Amino acid sequence: MDLFRTRCASRGLACTHQRWVIYRALMNSVEHPSPEGVYEQVRREMPSISLATVYKTIKTFVEVGLVREVSPEHATVRLDANLEPHHHFICLRCKAIYDLREEDIEPVTLRRGLPNGFRAERTTVEVLGLCPKCSREEQAN
Ligand SMILES: [Zn+2]
Ligand SMILES: [Zn+2]
């Protein structure tokens, strides 16, 4: 909660209970949920909340940099409350996204830079494969 408060304050965002509940749902998820997944989670605690409110709040979070959108490979947007530099493992079967520690992958360098006019903000590695659960299920078949 304190971290959330500090982060809100530094971004000029009012720290409301509703925002806190939504943010906490994002923080507590290791699988980079979709807004719908966050909604399912938050609804258990705040049954009156609407999906539109969750969308709107998440949009605000993304705009002020409290969470990030990840993975263009997913049809729906997936969210990441982990703002530390890190990489992702994406399961090709169930589409779950897991964090990989930055130090576990060699630094990525743009050896020749980017074509004219492009500006890099960050480089992330996506490791594609099977998560333990899907891997087990594949083997069972
Ligand atoms: Zn999987
Ligand atoms: Zn992540």
Image (cartoon, helix red, strand yellow):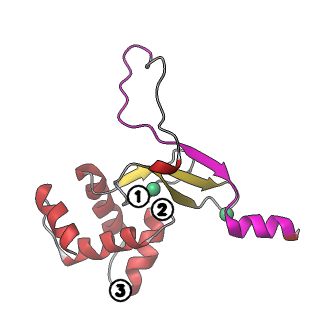
Q: Contact (CB < 8 A) between labels 3 and 1?
A: no
**Picture layout, residue 61 above or below residue 114:** below
Between 33 and 101, the one nearer to me in the picture: 101
Which residue is identified by label 1? 80
- Left/right placement of residue 13 relative to residue 127 reads left
Q: Position of residue 64 (x, y in %)?
A: 23, 52
Which residue is identified by label 2? 32
Given the image, on which type of amino acid does mark 3 rest?
Answer: Glu
Mark 2 vs ligand 2: CB under 8 Å? yes
Q: Position of residue 23 (x, y in %)?
A: 31, 69
- Choose the circle earlier in sequence order: 3 or 1: 3
Given the image, on which type of amino acid does mark 1 rest?
Answer: Asp
Q: CA distance from mark 2 to mark 1?
A: 5 Å
- Secondary element at tag 1: strand
Between 12 and 124, the one nearer to me in the picture: 124
Q: CA distance from mark 3 to mark 2?
A: 20 Å
- Choose the circle earlier in sequence order: 2 or 1: 2
- x 34%, y 54%: residue: 83
Is residue 47 shown to the viewer in this render? Answer: no
Q: Position of residue 54 (x, y in %)?
A: 34, 67
Which residue is identified by label 3? 45
Mark 1 vs ligand 2: CB under 8 Å? yes
- Secondary element at tag 3: helix
Q: Contact (CB < 8 A) between labels 2 and 1?
A: yes
Q: Position of residue 30 (x, y in %)?
A: 48, 67
Extreme-right residue of the structure: 141
**Picture layout, residue 11 above or below residue 37:** above
Q: CA distance from mark 3 to mark 1?
A: 21 Å
Mark 3 vs ligand 2: CB under 8 Å? no
- Left/right placement of residue 3 relative to residue 40 reads left
- Secondary element at tag 2: loop
